[in-house]
Amino acid sequence: MSITKNLTVLLVATSIFLISCSSSKNAPVAPRKDFKGNWTISSARLEGADGKINITAFDDAALKCFEGSEWVLPNNGYGSYTINGGADCPGGERKIIWSQRVSGGTTLFNFKKMDGVKRAIPNM
């Protein structure tokens, strides 16, 4: 039996808290135990925006499309997330490689999409 955890994704104006698209090679890597498992995103929002800004999260889909998405994060670091299809939401599974790191005493989740498309990632 699989346990699904509910999670709220909170995007901060200048940085992404909890889910980040890039990692620092100098940051200490934490054991994967904090994020390992199956997760369901129960809420996704941009802090302070109150729904006034439409953004594309992770160069993938509108932020609202991540609500209800399922994330599978096994200990080996090869995981996936699935967006439920719907109005303006490109449904389907996305393969990722994930890790976590500690920065300033806070554990951060990092992932890289493995969709076979090379993209330039802007400096954050």
Image: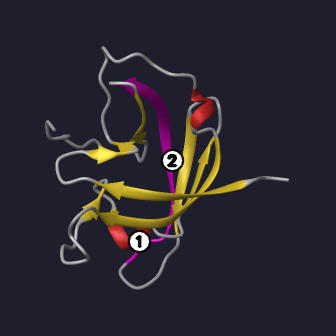
Is 55 located above or below residue 118 in the figure?
Answer: below
Element type where label 2 sits in the image: strand
Name the residue tied to disc 2.
95
**What span is in magenta?**
89-103
Element type where label 1 sits in the image: helix
Q: Is residue 83 magenta?
A: no
Residue 89 relative to residue 39: left or right: left
Q: Which mark is residue 65?
A: 1
Residue located 35% across and 81% down the image: 88
Instruction: Where is residue 53? Give x, y as percent.
Output: 18, 73
Tell me if label 2 and label 1 are in contact, CB under 8 Å.
Answer: no
Q: Which mark is residue 79?
A: none
Quadrant of the rendered image containing residue 27: top left
Q: Is residue 101 magenta?
A: yes
Residue located 48% across and 42% down the image: 96
Distance from Cα at disc 2 to Cα at disc 1: 17 Å
Amino acid on which disc 1 is placed: Cys
Instruction: Where is residue 112? Give x, y as percent.
Output: 39, 39
Residue 18 relative to residue 42: left or right: left
Instruction: Where is residue 118? Give x, y as percent.
Output: 28, 41
Q: Main secondary structure of the magenta part?
A: strand
